Image: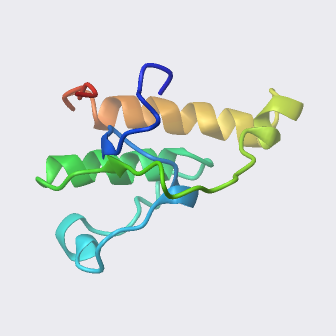
């Protein structure tokens, strides 16, 4: 989100799962996390894309601050089972959401 004004709240395509807060009725509208997606990161992106597809919105809120270290599994061992599973998940996600519209920050 390098092109996003991080001082303003607004709609975004997705946020990482460590930073998600959602209405309690959302899962009844979009279902639970896709259990076919295993990697760290894929399931939360899928969740947000499904949220948009169901007519809901995903927002970035700068007042909510979370410190989260991510990517350390695959960066330390790029050919690990975890990294290969991440690639498999990425391929699955690309196919699953191939028609998802791209949203741009206002």
User: In the rendering, at what x and y percent does residue 46 appear?
Assistant: 38, 47
Q: Residue at x 21, y 76 (%)?
A: 28
Give left or right: position of 68 versus 20.
right
User: In the rendering, at what x and y percent does residue 61 appear?
Assistant: 41, 51
Depth order, front residue of 43/85: 43
User: In the rendering, at what x and y percent does residue 35 appear?
Assistant: 46, 61
Give left or right: position of 80 versus 17.
right
Q: Quadrant of residue 71?
A: top right
| Relative height, residue 11 to residue 98 (above, below) | below
Res. 77 in view: no
Q: Residue furthest top?
A: 3
Give the image's coloring scheme.
Answer: rainbow
Depth order, front residue of 29/82: 29
Q: Residue furthest left?
A: 55
Res. 21 in view: yes
User: In the rendering, at what x and y percent does residue 27 appear?
Assistant: 28, 72
Depth order, front residue of 47/95: 47
Q: Residue furthest front?
A: 7
Q: Quadrant of residue 26?
A: bottom left
Quadrant of the image containing the C terminus: top left
Give left or right: position of 84 versus 39.
right
Give left or right: position of 34 versus 99.
right
| Relative height, residue 94 to residue 29 (above, below) | above
Q: Residue at x 62, y 37 (%)?
A: 86
Q: Residue at x 34, y 45 (%)?
A: 9
């Amino acid at each position: 989100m390098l092109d996003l004004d991080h001082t303003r709240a607004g709609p975004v395509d997705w946020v990482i799962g460590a930073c998600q807060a959602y209405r309690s009725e959302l899962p009844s509208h979009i279902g639970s996390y896709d259990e076919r997606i295993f990697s760290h990161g894929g399931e939360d992106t899928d969740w947000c894309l499904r949220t948009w597809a169901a007519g809901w919105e995903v927002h970035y809120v700068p007042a909510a601050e979370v410190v989260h270290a991510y990517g350390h599994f695959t960066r330390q061992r790029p050919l690990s089972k975890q990294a290969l599973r991440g690639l498999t998940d990425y391929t699955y996600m690309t196919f699953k959401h191939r028609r998802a519209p791209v949203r741009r920050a206002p």
